[in-house]
Image: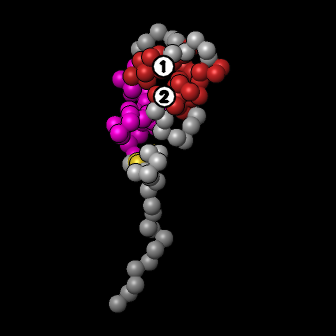
């Protein structure tokens, strides 16, 4: 959030994204923040998510419904075909395994 003028709403959106393990849609973030911020509009959420993504502060993920991630380091995701939820895939270490000797 370096290049743009400070915005309280942008900060709220960014913090909501940073504080969740989910990979929310813009609509989800809007629903989370709207009760405490009645003046917030869905358009504002979309604009600020796009600004944050363009700045590299967050990642935009193109699933059937666009989702967002505050973790900007490259990592794989899994998208459930049944419910549409998106999960981080964590690397698996095999260093503790020993190969059988022949």
Q: What colour scheme governs how the chains and residues are painted in the rendered image of this protein? A: secondary structure
Mark 1 lies on a secondary structure that is helix
Please say if 43 is above or below 62.
Answer: above
In terms of image quadrants, where is residue 98? bottom left
Please say if 81 is above or below 30.
Answer: below
**Residue that protrudes farthest toward the right in the picture:** 36
Please say if 90 is above or below 66.
Answer: below
Q: Residues within 10 Å of mark 1 (few under 14, many from 20)?
A: some
Mark 2 lies on a secondary structure that is helix
**Which residue is painted at 44% across and 17% down in the image?**
43
Instruction: Report the front residue among 96 and 16.
Output: 16
**Which residue is painted at 59% across and 24% down in the image?**
33
User: Whole-percent x and y of residue 46?
Assistant: 43, 21
Query: Marks 2 and 1: in contact by CB < 8 Å?
Result: yes
**Which residue is painted at 38% across and 36% down in the image?**
65
Quadrant (top left, top right, bottom left, bottom right) of the C terminus? bottom left
**Residue that protrudes farthest toward the top in the picture:** 5
What is the distance, in whole Å, between disc 1 and disc 2 at their CAs?
7 Å
In terms of image quadrants, where is residue 2? top left
Residue tagged 2: 27
**Which residue is painted at 43% across and 27% down in the image?**
57
Magenta range: 51-75
Magenta stretch contains residue 57: yes
Which numbered disc flags the more N-terminal residue, 1 or 2?
A: 2
Residue tagged 1: 42
Is residue 88 shown to the viewer in this render?
no
User: Whole-percent x and y of residue 80?
Assistant: 43, 51
């Amino acid at each position: 959030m370096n290049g743009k003028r400070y915005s309280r709403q942008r900060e709220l959106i960014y913090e909501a994204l940073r504080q969740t393990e989910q990979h929310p849609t813009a609509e989800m973030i809007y629903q989370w923040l709207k009760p405490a911020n009645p003046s917030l509009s869905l358009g504002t959420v979309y604009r600020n998510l796009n600004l944050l993504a363009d700045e590299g502060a967050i990642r935009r993920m193109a699933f059937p419904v666009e989702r967002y991630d505050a973790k900007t380091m490259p990592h794989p995701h899994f998208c459930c075909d049944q419910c549409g939820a998106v999960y981080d895939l964590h690397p698996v270490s095999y260093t503790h395994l020993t190969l059988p000797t022949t």
